Structures are given as C-alpha cells and as structure tokens.
Amino acid sequence: KVNHRSDIMTEVLGAKAVIFGSPTLNNGILPSLADIMTYMKGLKPSGKIGAAFGSFGWSGEAVKLLNNAMEEMKFEIIDPGVKVKNVPTHEDLKGCVALGERIAKAIKESV
C-alpha cells in the first residue's frame, strides 16, 4: 500500500519516537524518504525521540544524513545509529535489536 505523505505525517506527529532507515543511494538517502523528511521539516515536529539505521555498499552516508536532518528538526537522537555494510550479519541484527530496546527505554522514560 502506498501512503500519501499527509497520511504518514498524521502518524508521525502523534508518535513519541521516529526511526528512519535508508540505504545509501548515490551518496544520499532514498528519494521517497527525502520527500517525507522535507515535508516533515516544514511541520517542525520538535520534541521527538529519533534514531536512524541504514545499509551501504561502499560510502555509507545515509545514517549521518538522517541524523543531521533529525538534529535540524530538534529531535532527541538517542543513538548514533546502526550502519550495516552489504548484508547484515548476526551481530548487525543484534545491534538493531539493541537499538530497538534503547528506543523503547527512551520512550518509557519520556512518559
């Protein structure tokens, strides 16, 4: 199902945390996510908990770009993010689970 960005923003604005994920594509993030983030910046959703994850083949800028965008939106970034080169290993997947646990803890502490 394809959602319109306004539908996505309704969910995002009601959320305590937003976690962005993207592979690095041409030294950037996926165009569809860039579109959503540009729209989101205009809505100024400050006070959110944020984190990022991504994969890459050789350059790996996506997580840094996602974190920079969240900083601009005044998100509380709770982790530098998970970066995975090529196919995730078992250790990479454990890192993803650990990130999810840190996000859950941050949400509980914010209530």
Image: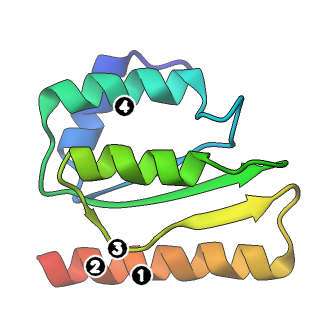
Mark 4 or mark 2: name the one nearer the start of the chain: 4
Assess whether mark 2 and mark 3 are in contact (beta carbons under 8 angstroms). Answer: yes
Query: Looking at the image, is mark 3 or mark 2 nearer the viewer?
Result: 3
Can you identify the residue that label 2 sits on? 106
Tell me how far mark 2 sits from mark 1, CA to CA: 6 Å
Can you identify the residue that label 4 sits on? 37
The numbered dot on residue 78 is 3
Does residue 76 lie above or below 2 as drawn?
A: below
Mark 1 or mark 4: name the one nearer the start of the chain: 4
Q: Which residue is drawn at the image coordinates 60% and 77% (left, top)?
A: 97
Judging from the image, what secondary structure is the residue with disc 2 in? Answer: helix
Residue closer to the observer: 24 or 20: 24
Mark 3 or mark 4: name the one nearer the start of the chain: 4
Tell me how far mark 1 sits from mark 4, CA to CA: 23 Å
**Where residue 91 sits in the image (x, y, percent)?**
78, 82
The numbered dot on residue 14 is none
- Tell me the crowding category of disc 3: few under 14, some 14 to 19, or many 20 or more residues within 10 angstroms, Cα based: some
Assess whether mark 1 and mark 3 are in contact (beta carbons under 8 angstroms). Answer: yes
Amino acid under label 3? Ile
